[in-house]
Image (tube, helix red, strand yellow):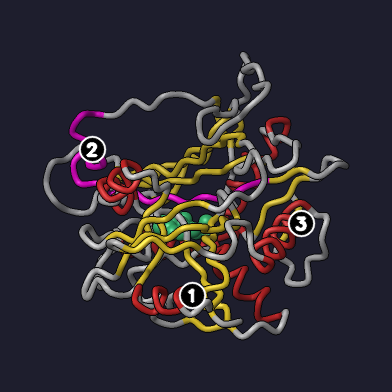
Amino acid sequence: MLNIKVTRTTSPKKKPEGELGFGKIFTDHMFEMTYTKNQGWHDAKIKPFSNLSLSPATVIFHYGQEIFEGLKAYKDESGKCYLFRPDMNARRMNTSAKRLCMPEIPEEDFIQAVAELVKTDRDWIPTNPGTSLYIRPFMIATEEFLGVAPSNEYKFMIILSPSGAYYKDGLNPVKIWIEDEYVRAVRGGTGFTKTGANYAIGLAGQEKAHADGYSQVLWLDGIERKYVEEVGAMNIFFVIDGKVVTPLLNGSILPGVTRNTVLALCNSWGYPVEERKISAEELLTAQKNGKLEEVFGTGTAAVISPVGTLRFQDEVLTVGDGKIGTLSQKLYDTVTGIQLGTCEDPFNWRMEI
Ligand SMILES: *Cc1c(COP(=O)(O)O)cnc(C)c1O
């Protein structure tokens, strides 16, 4: 159990009205705790949202020792607040920490910190359909030192951002670019962690896709550049000839909470499910034979993001009839229903706070 000291703001901000967008507005408070080699984690506090003051020689600015998480809080009509599977985020944060030589955080402390901060700012949880409070826990190396070595000091922080409906006009399929020049992750690298570096090296591919009118990149494996791995911030699923297929976790793919959720639901509904290697060639062939029935991305931000167009080299494939597929819609309705408390929760994924 953390002993969290709470200092409330004396000048609360005005709550936003109208469109929230994503990641632009921040609540009144933040969580912060400090790690030093001698004391371990200590000084846990919730305090007014404020800027940081760090030496220009701080490790984070030079060698990128940083990890993060992303989850959401929801409020139902009666005002009850929920988190969705925060234990999965707590565990993954520690997987990332180990890979980046950073200190782990006890899972129950991570969940307690998230829950306490969300409760402090519970009036900031939006309630319009499709909206939620996005939660961003992150850890940075804070030692003042230019040598290349794991930092001896860290800060773990959590900030909150009310976010709007991802889809303003319903679940419209997106266009995805299969990237065959740049790679995101390699075997033995950091693909399975949530670290800022993975995003920094993905920007060039993303810019290339944007320039051509595609909204996201689907990355290929870094060795053969043959097998599809995942989208920028989403895992990827295909319905091929009645089977639900997704790339096998191989160390260069991020193990998404939503991916795990979708697999569990599809299994419980009796769909044939396969986790395996999927080549871009296989997708081309399946599409030509009329067997590529649905494609969708999964991630906390969008939940389910239907894909309508895939581009690989000179081939542009359309998926389905340009509308969201049956399974994609069923998954979206079920997952968001469980998150909001309007659907039964047979796996006990929802946590009331
Ligand atoms: C966060 C993330 C995902 C999705 O994970 P969820 O836990 O479902 O939100 C997928 N890919 C990458 C690279 C990510 O960073």
x, y percent for residue 206: 32, 47
Task: Identify residue for label 1.
Answer: 246
* Local secondary structure at mark 1: strand
Q: Assess disc 1: are there few (<14), some (14-19) or many (≥20) residues with their C-alpha within 10 Å of its C-alpha.
A: many
Precedes in sequence: disc 1 or disc 2: 2
Question: Cα distance, mark 2 to mark 3?
Answer: 41 Å
What is the magenta range?
55-73
Amino acid at circle 1? Thr
Q: Residue at x 64, y 64 (%)?
A: 325
Question: Cα distance, mark 1 to mark 2?
Answer: 36 Å
* Local secondary structure at mark 3: helix
- Quadrant in which residue 316 is drawn: bottom left
* Front disc: 1 or 2: 1
Residue 66 magenta-highlighted:
yes
Depth check, front residue: 166 or 293: 293
Precedes in sequence: disc 3 or disc 1: 1
Label disc, if present, on residue 74 of the rendered structure: none
Amino acid at circle 3? Gly
Q: Residue at x 63, y 50 (%)?
A: 171
Q: Residue at x 81, y 45 (%)?
A: 76
Task: Identify residue for label 3.
Answer: 337
Question: Cα distance, mark 3 to mark 1?
Answer: 23 Å
Q: Assess disc 2: are there few (<14), some (14-19) or many (≥20) residues with their C-alpha within 10 Å of its C-alpha.
A: some
x, y percent for residue 349: 70, 64
Task: Identify residue for label 2.
Answer: 61
x, y percent for residue 14: 65, 16
Q: Is mark 3 within 8 Å of ligand 1?
A: no
* Local secondary structure at mark 2: helix
Q: Are marks 1 and 2 in contact (CB under 8 Å)?
A: no
186 vs 53, left or right, is left
